[in-house]
Amino acid sequence: MGGLLIRKRRSSSSSSVVLLPLFWAFFLAIFLERLVGVVSGLEYSKDKQASSLTLERIQKHLDKINKPAVMTIESPDGDIIDCIDKWKQPAFDHPLLKNHKLQLVPPEMPKVRRMKEEEVKGDKHISSRKNEERVVISGRGAWQVWHQNRTRCPKGTVPIRRTTVDDVLRAQSLYDFGKKQPRMALARHTVSPDDVNATGHEYAIASSSPSEAVYGAAATINLWNPSVQVEAEMSISQIWVLAGSFEGSDLNSVEAGWHVLPNLYGDKSTRLFVYWTADGYQSTGCYNTLCPGFVQVDKEIVVGTAIAPVSTISGKLYESNIFIWKDPKTENWWLGYENNNAVGYWPSNLFTHLAANATLVEWGGEVLNTKPNGAHTSTQMGSGRFAQEGNGKASYFRNLGLVDSNNDINPPQSTSTRADNSNCYSINLLNNNDWGTHFFYGGPGFNPNCP
C-alpha cells in the first residue's frame, strides 16, 4: 500500500515537473505581450515600430489630409485614389487660401515658338538631326497605372492619392514627412562644387536665368525607372521654376517632374510629382497634396501616382510634356501634363517673389548618395547611362522652353550646365531644329571611376 502511494506521489511529481515549465512559458508570454502593448505602448506597422502616442498623432494628421471620399478607386499597384469634393480638398486648409476662389476653368496653355533655322545654326551646342532619330511614344503612350482600373471620379470631385500610416512612418518625423530638407535642397547653390558631395545630393542640370522676367518653363522629359540602391535614396528628374535668394529663407520654388522615392511611397515606381516652397524649404510646402497648397483640378492625372510604361534601353522610348506657367489673368501657377491636361495649380498668394514672376529655371536630374557600404551609391540617374551614350540609351530633356509675358514658350537664349561629378553622372547640352535646346544626362553612379 505504501509502495503504491509512493508511486502515485512520484507520478504526481513527474506531472508537475512537466506542467511547471509550460505554466511559466505561458505566464511569460502574457507578461511580455502586456509589457510591449501596455507598458511601453509600442505597436508595429509594416515598415516601422511606433508608440501609441506617435500613431495617434499620425492619425490626426492623416485625418486632415485624407478628406472624406465620395468614391474610392483601387489602383493595380496598391495605391488608393480617393475622389474628393473639389471644394473640400486639402489645399483649402491653408490659412492663405481660406477665401480662395477655386479656378474651375483652366487657362490657355502656353504656345510653343519654334526656333528659327538661323538661331539653331548660331548655337554652339548644335547637333545633327541624324543623331536624334528615335522611336518615341509621347502623349498617352505613357500614362498612369491607376488608369488600368478604367474607373474615373464622378463629377464635382477630384482624384487624390490616399496617404497611409506607413507612408508617414517612413519619414524621419511627422514634421519632415513629405518635405525636402533645406540644406540638401539648396546645396547646389549654397555649397561650393568641391563640397557639394558632402551633402549627399548630386546634380546634372541645365539652367537659364534671362534678364527679362520668366513666367514659366517647359520640357519634354524622357521617362525611365532608375534603380535606387537603398530605401533612403532617391532619383529625380524635374523642372525647377525659381525666384528669390538661395540664402536664408527667401527662395520661392514650384517644381514638377518624375521621381523614384521609396521613403515617400514605399516602392520604387516612377511617379509624377509636384513640389513647392515659399521660404527656401524651411517650413512651407511639400510634395504633391501632402500639405495644403497645390490645388488639384484635373480628373485624369493625379500627382504622386505611378507612370507606366517607361523607356527601356535600345527599346521604345516614352516621354511626357511638362509645363509650368503663370496664368496671366489669375496669376496662379499651373501644371500642364502632356498637351491637354491642366492638372492643377499653386495659388499665387502662397508666394512672395513668385507672386510676380520667376527669375531662374533649372532642368535635370538629382540623386541622393548616402554612400552605402562606404562607397558611392549605385543609384542611377535617368536611364543609368552616361550622357555621352546618346539617344536610345541616355535619358534626355528636349525642347526646353521659357514662358514669356505673352504666354509664348521660347527656347532659352543662354543655357549653362552643371554636373557635380561627371564620373558618376554627366550631362551633354545640344541643339537642333527637331529637339530645340536639349540635353542627355545621367549615369550609373558607382563604377571604377566613381568609387
Image: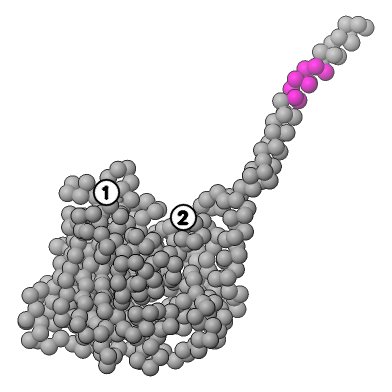
Q: Position of residue 221 (x, y in %)?
A: 28, 73
Q: From the image, which quarter does the N terminus lie in?
A: top right
User: Which of the two residues, 311 or 334, is positioned nearer the viewer here?
Assistant: 334
Q: Is residue 354 magenta?
A: no
Q: CA distance from mark 1 to mark 2?
A: 22 Å
The residue carrying mark 1 is 376
Q: Nearer the viewer, residue 223 or 123?
A: 123
The spot of residue 74 in percent (x, y) is: 53, 69
Q: Secondary structure at mark 1?
A: loop
Which amino acid, mark 1?
His
Q: In this picture, which residue range is highlighted in magenta?
A: 12-20
Outermost residue to the front: 248
| Among the two numbered marks 1 and 2 on one chain, the one whose residue lies closer to the N terminus | 2
Principal secondary structure, stretch drawn in magenta = helix
Question: Could you say which quadrant of the image residue 11 lies in?
Answer: top right
Residue linked to disc 2: 172
The foreground one among 201 and 238 is: 201
Q: Position of residue 408 (x, y in %)?
A: 25, 90
The answer to which quarter of the image holds residue 127 is bottom left
Q: Is residue 411 above or below residue 285?
A: below
Identify the amino acid type marked 2: Gln
At label 1, counting other C-alpha atoms closer than 10 Å, the crowd grade (few under 14, some 14-19, many 20 or more) is some
Image coordinates of residue 89 in percent, x first then y, are 54, 78
Is 19 drawn above or below residue 327 in the view shown? above
Residue at 64% of width from left, 48% of height from top? 41
Say what secondary structure mark 2 lies in.
Answer: loop
Residue at image coords 28%, 52%: 198
